[in-house]
Image (cartoon, rainbow, N blue to C red):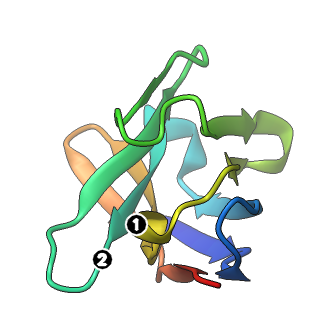
């Protein structure tokens, strides 16, 4: 079992920045990858960014160059630095951890980009 706790969402103006954090606990040694997903109203949940053991990363095309995912192994924490935010980035953002074929999810944190 893995437990995930997110923080850092909020309201920001277009062009602004936010940093999301997610701290994992439980069977963290079995985690093979962590990531962030988001779900906007009326839309399916989509991958935003993912980081693998060894620190390779991948990003959705819509956020590449604006968002950066990172991971602090000593603190069992991953981060999502979001810059140049756009109204279309508005969504609930979910932390994800993968253990073998199982996905674990955080409770979600709201990000709203609006003037």
Q: Residue at x 71, y 78 (%)?
A: 12
Crowd around label 2: few <14 · some 14–19 · many ≥20 (10 Å): some
Q: Residue at x 47, y 83 (%)?
A: 107
Helix, strand or loop at label 1? It is: helix
> Can you tell which mark lies on residue 40?
2
Nearest the eye: 42 or 14: 14
Q: Position of residue 101 (x, y in %)?
A: 19, 42
Residue 92, quarter of picture: bottom left
Nearest the eye: 80 or 41: 41
Of the 4 image quadrants, the one containing the N terminus is bottom left
For the view shown, which residue lies furthest in the right direction? 74
Q: Residue at x 76, y 60 (%)?
A: 17
> Can you tell which mark lies on residue 51?
none
Q: Is residue 50 left or right of residue 100?
A: right
Q: Is residue 98 left or right of residue 13?
A: left
> Can you tell which mark lies on residue 88?
1
Q: Position of residue 45 (x, y in %)?
A: 22, 65
Q: Tell me: residue 9, above or below residue 29.
A: below
Q: Are marks 2 and 1 in contact (CB under 8 Å)?
A: yes
Nearest the eye: 79 or 1: 79
Helix, strand or loop at label 2? It is: loop
Any part of residue 31 in sight: no
């Amino acid at each position: 079992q893995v437990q995930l706790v997110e923080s850092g969402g909020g309201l920001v103006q277009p062009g602004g920045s936010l940093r999301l954090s997610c701290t994992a606990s439980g069977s963290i040694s079995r985690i093979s990858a962590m990531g962030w997903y988001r779900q906007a109203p009326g839309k399916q949940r989509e991958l935003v960014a993912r980081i693998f053991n060894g620190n390779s990363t991948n990003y959705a095309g819509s956020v590449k160059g604006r968002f950066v995912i990172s991971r602090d192994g000593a603190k069992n924490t991953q981060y999502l630095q979001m810059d140049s935010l756009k109204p279309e980035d508005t969504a609930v953002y979910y932390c994800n951890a993968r253990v073998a074929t199982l996905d674990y999810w955080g409770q979600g944190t709201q990000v709203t980009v609006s003037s």
